[in-house]
Amino acid sequence: MSKPSRREFIKSSLLMAGAVAFSGSFLKPIKVFAKAAEKEIPLPPGEKKLDENDAVAKALGFHHNVKDIDYTRYPQRKKPEAKDQFCKNCALYSAKNEGWGKCQMLANGVVSAQGWCGSWNKKA
Ligand code: SF4
């Protein structure tokens, strides 16, 4: 195999730099979108966010974000077939707005639509 010429080396370096720059600008809108999705939706007027340290919430293993679930206690939530389980599609959830709702089990505040607990039950 022949040694690449200086011209070929510079050409491939420029192509590589262009590809890196392009991928950075391509990914930027995706990162911005992901950040917006993470942004918390304001609480419904007159409602307070349920404290995860609430006795019933703790007993049920409730968390506003499924990433915080104790998967050693609730391994079933980690199974692929459970990936779409959230408060928003639980039978005990009543939406107050697009991000928050009331849970029939948890009276001391609203729960996140993205939350989960061990009493999750599929909405009919
Ligand atoms: S019972 Fe349903 S709505 Fe209530 S916290 Fe658990 S998963 Fe969410």
Image (cartoon, rainbow, N blue to C red):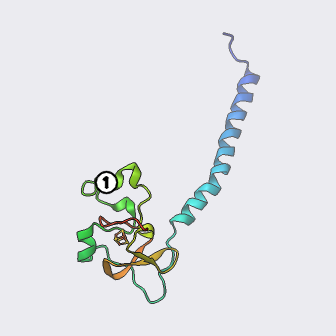
Characterize the local packing of mark 1: few (<14), some (14-19) or many (20 or more) Cα atoms within 10 angstroms. Answer: few
Q: Is residue 40 left or right of residue 1?
A: left
Q: Would residue 66 be found to the left or right of residue 37 on screen? A: left
Q: Quadrant of ligand 1?
A: bottom left
Q: How many labels sit on residues?
A: 1
Q: Whole-percent x and y of residue 34?
A: 56, 59
Q: At x 31% / y 68%, what residue is drawn?
A: 62
Query: Which residue appears at 42% of the width and 55% of the height?
Result: 83
Amino acid type, callout 1: Gln
- Name the residue rendered at 38%, 59% in the picture: 67
Which residue is rendered at x = 34% and y = 66% of the image?
A: 120
Question: Residue 86 falls in which quadrant of the image?
Answer: bottom left
**Image spot of residue 30 (x, y percent):** 61, 55
Hey, which residue is sitting farthest top in the picture? 1
- Quarter of the image where one finds residue 70: bottom left
Ligand 1 closer than 8 Å to the CB at disc 1? no
Question: Badge 1 is on which residue?
Answer: 76
Instruction: Decide which of 75, 119 is in the foreground and name it.
Output: 119
In this view, the residue farthest toward the right is: 7
Quarter of the figure that contains the N terminus = top right
Q: x, y (%) of residue 24?
A: 64, 48
* Left or right, 37 with reference to 110: right
Q: Residue reaching furthest bottom?
A: 46
Nearer to us in this view, 69 or 103: 103
Q: Quadrant of the C terminus?
A: bottom left
Q: Check disc 1 and report its element: helix, strand or loop.
A: helix
Q: Position of residue 116 (x, y in %)?
A: 36, 66
